[in-house]
Image (tube, grey):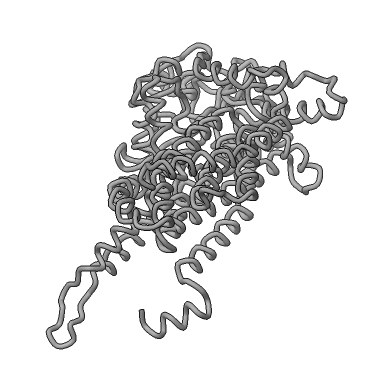
Amino acid sequence: MTGKTCAFRRMFGDPWDLAAAFGLLALLGLVAATFRHYGISNDEEVQHVYGAKLIDWYRSGFTDTSAFTYKNLYLYGGLFDMAAVALAPFLPFDPYETRHLLCALIGVAGVAVVWAVGRRLAGPRAGLLAGLLLALCGPWYGGLFNHTKDVPFAMLMMAAVALLIRIVGQMPRPRWGTVLGFGLVVGLALGIRVGALMLAGYVAAALVGWVVAGGLSAPRLRQGVSGALRLLPALPVAYGVMAVFWPWAVLEPLNPLRALADFSHFHYPIRTMLGGTEYWMYEVPRSYLAWYLAIKLPLVMLAGAALGLLALPGMMRSDLVDEEGKARAVACGLVALAALFPVVWFTLTHSPGYTAIRHFLFVLPPLAVLGGIGLDRLLGWAGAWRFGVSQRSGRGLSAAALAGGFLALVLGREAVVLESLHPNEYVYFNELVGGVAGAVRKYDVDYWANSLPEAVENLAEVIAEEEARTHRHRTYSVAVCAEPLAFEKLAPANMRWVTDWTRADFFIAPTQEDCDTLMTGPTVAEVERGGAVLAVVKDLRRPAEPSETVEMARLRSGRQQRHWW
């Protein structure tokens, strides 16, 4: 390390940590500047109502039980929805903008947790790379704003893994603050989804791993049991927090298990696309989740995670020299478990699936940590090689510099792609299917109809141009293949929603599930991203061209409304 580098570290800290801090600040700035750009998803209205009903249960002195019979929402915790409803009166935004801002801030916290875990396991550079991989992942960044169950749940699951890693480092006498903090985070995660129960398995794996890493001796086993007993106070904390935000779960002792069983047999009439084939959600192939992960995540993230998995055994063997190293080895195993176990479980149990990887966003943070470790190890390996070495100076161009420059270009390209998709970053697909253009009509792309706001704006421009030309002003009826609220929040006064599509003047529809084929008429506007048409606006007042009529003749029944709850 040069003297200049040492002086820089003394003045400003580690440069990788400094870069990570600037990156998080930049991410917060992007959130603040863009959170109003995103549409209202198909689920948000019912989720917001559910949050209000849960608060009403408390306000009524536990007499208003309508929350426990409202659709199937009682099977979920209401943590995020209750928080959004409670915050909305105090912020100068529309309630749904408040939801998007709150969700995005939680998602940024998830990036920070990933950075911290990557840094703890493999150093500051690995932490920075892990955070960058997650922040530049389209499904994560695009989901920050309206995946209001999935992103908070994913952040809390990763936070729980981070605290469990800290607990392992404190064994056999984990500190009470860490234990109670773990219980709090587990309770918050259960306050969103019952799937957080898998954290019990992670705890067991951590304890077994700690014992095995120490040599599997009788004294080590006794210490493991003692450490496990010290974790017991986390249980009542987790249960109490869960009860606050998911009261249905504690109305009867077995309700959480009932919810878990219901989700395991989640057979609703919801369709999903995979490779151009349409499936009912309960008929998807076992490869559904792995397939979608392979095409929805950036290739640099997938390659980094693969390298990280390959590097872990060597890292873990080299760490088994002292207690700190053994704890780090167990922590590496925990991150791999958090990334892979849900995918393996989904595949082996042949679980239902729909809307791509939305319900499994919680595997992205640990995958990003693995990716950061893998890319860091790649740069470290490249540092041992030099090109064009001079005989006089012994210096040459480091392969690490070339690899670092190439990696910066790759990550920069991912940022450019996300910018080009804005505000529809969540529709991202990687090069294995030709990006969004290759995925549209073959996979679940714009399943939230997030392209609707831009389509409404486009229709407003079409109408304005027509009225400027004809000098005739009136109100126009619009049929929309999406939820009414998403349209009504955006539509100007001269547009009104109609349920009878045959009497509509215009038709707005996403291309998701060929919804745009349900009505015929000339297309007057399109929402396009990445070479793919995400939504169309049709003029139903005029007949379509003959070629368009043939194309639009493939009508499908039962698709005028889409519900994902």
Q: Quadrant of residue 196?
A: top right
Q: For the view shown, which residue lies furthest in the front direction?
A: 218
Disc tally is: 0
From the viewer's perspective, is 338 left or right of 160?
left
Q: For the view shown, which residue lies furthest in the bottom direction?
A: 392
Instruction: Look at the image and tell me whether residue 468 can be seen.
Output: yes
Q: Residue at x 36, y 82 (%)?
A: 2
From the viewer's perspective, is 451 left or right of 208?
right
The one nearer the camera, 397 or 534, is: 397
Q: Quadrant of the N terminus?
A: bottom left
Instruction: Look at the image and tell me whether residue 528 can be seen.
Output: no
Q: Residue at x 31, y 37 (%)?
A: 433
Residue 392 higher or lower than 165, as above or below: below
- Where does residue 501 sit, x and y in percent of width and height? 60, 17
The one nearer the camera, 462 or 64, is: 64
Residue 359 higher or lower than 20, as above or below: above
- Where does residue 422 sit, x and y in percent of width and height? 51, 47
Q: Residue at x 51, y 36 (%)?
A: 525
Residue 534 higher or lower than 262, as above or below: below
Q: Quadrant of the C terminus?
A: top right
